[in-house]
Image (cartoon, rainbow, N blue to C red):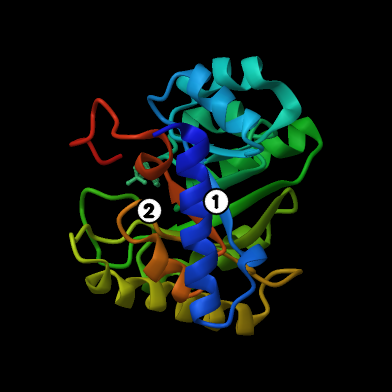
Amino acid sequence: MSVAENLFLVKQRIAAAARRVGRDPAEVRLVAVSKTVPVERLREAVAAGHRLFGENYLQEALPKIAALGGEVSWHFVGALQTRKAKGVVGVFDLIHSVDRPKLARALEKAAAQRGLIQKILIQVNLAGEATKSGVAPEEAEALLREIAQLPHLKVVGLMTMPPWFDEPERVRPYFRALRELRDHLQKLGLTDGPLPELSMGMTGDFEAAVEEGATLVRIGTAVFGPRPDACFRA
Ligand SMILES: *Cc1c(COP(=O)(O)O)cnc(C)c1O
């Protein structure tokens, strides 16, 4: 199937999941995760009207961004090394993977130098998996308090990569937990604005994520087809 057809079908499934729980489908944005995908396939998505891509690696993303230019919006969804902070600030409209004070401070410094406000999400590791990035849920409040002091970072919500199950229903409790954590943090009023964004749901489980409140679903395989490195879960 073509990228255009895949996009059409995924967007239909997102809209149907939203309507099942009485949500407006327009509240949910599809981040087409394009790691390892050649730029020609991204062009097909752009030609089909898609304008939002997620990348995991700065080195891989930069040539794609240069090729497609400001036509589209880019999100950084991968694990981020502190020394790469300077490279991502201002290049990506949203960084999904901020999970530690040191990284936040590096992003703050880079954003201050460039004179801009960088939007970010706090990545939460809900199941405490050693192989995954993300702040522990019980430490999320402390991290948010720290970041709220940094004038060039704007936290707009939370992101999670839950444990992998072949049944989406088994992932649902994690999606719900992220929403509840967001509701809790939002009530504390630590940030200037609300925390509207919930980045959760991938190819295997995005409908459950939408039903639980996702506003950003990060979908690679269902849009672009299987990756050559499909067993590698970044
Ligand atoms: C690769 C990746 C995705 C997309 O995964 P699919 O299962 O191919 O949809 C989503 N989020 C992150 C952080 C990823 O690295």
User: Which mark is drawn over residue 30?
Assistant: 1
Q: Ligand 1 is found in which quarter of the picture?
A: top left
Residue at the right extreme, as displayed: 115
The image shows residue 6, relative to residue 47, as above or below, that is below
Which residue is label 2 attached to?
202
Name the residue located 45 percent from the left edge and 76 percent from the top edge: 212
Question: In the rendered image of this protein, does residue 168 appear above or below residue 29?
Answer: below
Residue at image coords 46%, 52%: 10
Indicate the position of residue 193 as horizontal and vertical percent values: 75, 70
Q: Is residue 132 above or below residue 173?
A: above
Q: What secondary structure is found at the residue carrying circle 2?
A: loop
Q: How far apart are the two marked residues, 1 and 2, measured between alpha carbons?
A: 10 Å
Q: Position of residue 226 (x, y in %)?
A: 29, 34
Q: Can residue 133 be spotted in the picture?
A: yes
Quadrant for the N terminus in the image: top left
Mark 2, other Cα within 10 Å: few <14 / some 14–19 / many ≥20 = many
Q: Is mark 2 within 8 Å of ligand 1?
A: yes
Q: Nearer the viewer, residue 231 or 126?
A: 231
Decide which of tag 1 and tag 2 comes sooner along the chain.
1
Badge 1 amino acid:
Leu
User: Visible in this render: residue 96?
Assistant: no
Q: Quadrant of residue 28?
A: bottom right
Q: Going by the image, does 57 lie left or right of 19?
A: left
Give the camera-side residue of 9 and 213: 9
Which element carries disc 1, helix, strand or loop? strand
Q: Quadrant of residue 166?
A: bottom left
Relative to 131, 30 lies left or right: right
